Amino acid sequence: MQEPILLSTAYFPPLEYFSLIARNRKVRIEKWENFLKQTYRNRCTILGTNGPLTLTVPVLRGSFHKTALKDLEIDNTRRWRDHHLRSIISACATAPFFEYYFDVIEGVVRKPFRFLLDLNNEALSAVCEAIGITAEISFTDIYQPQEVALNDYRYLITPKRPSILENYSETAYIQVFRAKFGFVPRLSIIDVLLNNGPGTGALVLRSLESK
């Protein structure tokens, strides 16, 4: 029996995150770890008219105490939803499949979630359904240290360093501002989906081929 892979939760993460799901099919999402700032756990990147643009979900955290991710609350006093959606519209309104898939993204962002984990889980389910990836996804029961956990990718997919996934190379695709900036890899699945539509699933699989 195939051992599940272990992933961090993520807010509309990049293509490589979904390539792992497509490759392994059985996934466990970590919910017991302490929250890590400046990761895909609460942020994603799209390509706007001025270059890569980071969209961050604001969270409530205690000033002096570490917060378990399962208990991490979204700061809904801030109008982050409007900001994210306006930014996506501004960046991707001319993308080939915007009118077909923007409603999927907006439906996730507009839901009044209290906890970040619930928001991210909804985003993951919506994207997997949209691109035809079926996976057995569940949450972890306990926290396992890095040196103990098997198939552990929780801390390997990060905006702070290049992809380390074996046989992974992101296939270039149409981007709204590609003529201005060239192809920009590791953007949010939002950018991939709105530009590639039904072809996103095939793009995920091509990115797994040996190079």
Image (cartoon, rainbow, N blue to C red):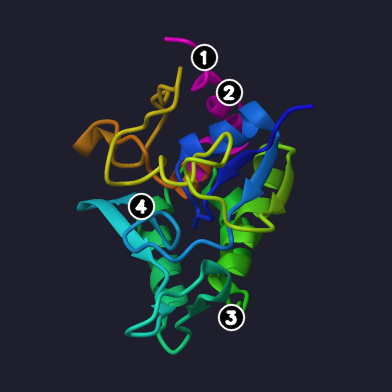
| Residue 70 relative to residue 95: left or right | right
Q: Are marks 1 and 3 in contact (CB under 8 Å)?
A: no
Identify the disc placed on residue 45. Answer: 4
Q: Are marks 1 and 2 in contact (CB under 8 Å)?
A: yes
In this rendering, the label closer to the viewer, 4 or 1: 1
Location of mark 1 (residue): 209
Q: What main secondary structure does the magenta stretch of the protein show?
A: helix
- Asked whether residue 123 is in view, the answer is yes
Of the numbered discs 4 and 2, the one sitting upstream in the chain is 4
- Comparing 184 with 43, the one in front is 43
Mark 1–mark 3 Cα distance, whole angstroms, equals: 39 Å
**Quarter of the image that includes the N terminus:** top right
Of the numbered discs 1 and 3, the one sitting upstream in the chain is 3
Residue type indicated by callout 3: Arg
Identify the disc placed on residue 114. Answer: 3
Give me the residue at 46% from left, 75% from top: 67
Of the numbered discs 3 and 2, the one sitting upstream in the chain is 3
Identify the disc placed on residue 14. Answer: none
| Residue 8 relative to residue 43: left or right | right
Q: What's drawn in magenta, residue-wise? A: 194-211
Mark 4–mark 1 Cα distance, whole angstroms, equals: 24 Å
Rendered image quadrant of residue 32:
bottom right
Give me the residue at 56% from left, 76% from top: 71
